[in-house]
Image (cartoon, helix red, strand yellow):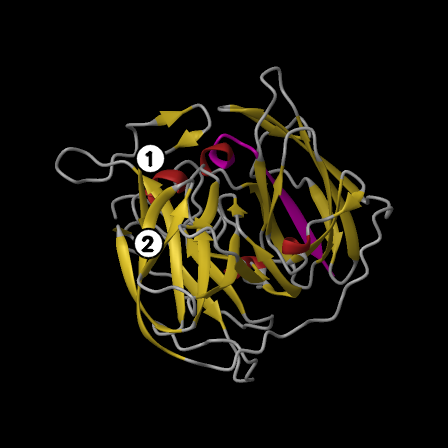
Amino acid sequence: MDEPTTFHWHGLVIPADMDGGPHQTVAPGERAQVRLDIDQEPSTLWFHPHPMGSTAEQVYKGLAGLLYVTNDTPNGLPNEYGVDDIPLIVQDRRFTPNGGLDYDAHMNVDGTTGDTILANGAINTTFDVQTETLRVRLVNGSNARDFDFTLSNEAEMTQIATEGGPLERPIPLRTITLTPGERAEVLIDFSQVEDVAALKADGVTFTTFRVGELDKASIKIPVTETMERSTDKTADRRLTLFGFGNMVSINGKTYDPERIDIEAKRGDTEVWEIENKPDMMGGMTHPFHIHGVQFRVISRDGNPTYDQEKGWKDTVAVAPDERVKIEITFTKTGTFMYHCHILEHEENGMMGQVKVTE
């Protein structure tokens, strides 16, 4: 490319100098060597650039991809890539008359949205189902759009994992909602489907499943240890997200690369309370993301969090006038970003820095 970029590994627990934040730009024609020492739960992660001022357009035009963390321990789940375990990176895009991506065509005050839904960079994808149970890894890779995922036959899907690893127990759902940056792993049962079924985003079919003769398999969904989530834990930090368009802030401030907003100690466990302060128009949901760590959601407005997010996460949706508490332990040192994952909000300054020291 003829512009700088960075290599950010979204969801990896790695030191800050490998994280690829806006400080670590790579100039046109240059190379960067990145060492990734992986020590975290098997999970569905992704990567994308993070240069200040051009992240949104670079992601929109294609700089994003999938990253799996795996291990060699059998867990009873479908795991044959492309056969019974498939990814679906879902994005909305708008095209020029000659088929090019048109980033500027539908930019509004809160990000760029499109009129066409893509899965893995393609339109109207199909998949020939070979097994009764299919594992689908859903990624909302859009700049600004939330998605409600449903099946065309209105059947339930079984969510088994969040961004950073398995749920405490499987959760049957007819609708799975993901904000930008969030991921979910689901199991879909095709044993009662005779011909075709489809996966929809906001009611629009984007992937069709063609069903023929199916192989049966013994599926055993692992159950993880239940974490104690005390809803009355006192917050160590309070962050207030506010605004829309180019008037966005965290705790009344916009991003300054020379300013450290939070100082934390490696190994200390903290509770952060994230508030989405409504504006005169009522406000909108902000997906809050932290680099270099996975966290647990412990409460929403003082109530227990949803069962479908009781797993490790790196992005959490915060609705207008809502307060979400998360429990977090930094295990790597350096300066990390936290921000709204509506990419245009991030670029307009809805971002801060946490410095983790020994």
Vertical position of residue 19 compared to residue 289: above or below: below
* Residue for point 34% across, 39% down: 57
* Residue for point 67% across, 72% down: 223
Q: Pointers 2 and 1 in contact (CB under 8 A)? A: no
Q: Determine if residue 65 is in view.
A: no
* Residue for point 71% across, 57% down: 357
Circle 2: element type: strand
The kind of residue tagged 2 is Thr
Residue bounds of the magenta highlight: 346-358
The kind of residue tagged 1 is Gly
Vertical position of residue 297 compared to residue 343: above or below: below
Gap in angstroms between the C-alphas marked 2 and 1: 17 Å
User: Label 1: which residue?
Assistant: 114
Does 273 sit left or right of 318 as displayed? right
User: Label 2: which residue?
Assistant: 207
Residue 9 within the segment the image draws in magenta: no
Q: Which mark is residue 39?
A: none
Is disc 1 surrounded by few (<14), some (14 to 19) or many (20+) residues within 10 Å? many
Q: Position of residue 273 (x, y in %)?
A: 75, 41
Vertical position of residue 239 compared to residue 230: above or below: above
Is disc 2 surrounded by few (<14), some (14 to 19) or many (20+) residues within 10 Å? many
Q: Position of residue 161 (x, y in %)?
A: 58, 63
Residue 350 within the segment the image draws in magenta: yes
Instruction: Kindly indicate the quadrant of the structure image that contains residue 170.
Output: bottom right
Q: Position of residue 281 (x, y in %)?
A: 58, 17
Q: Earlier in the sequence, mark 2 or mark 1?
A: 1
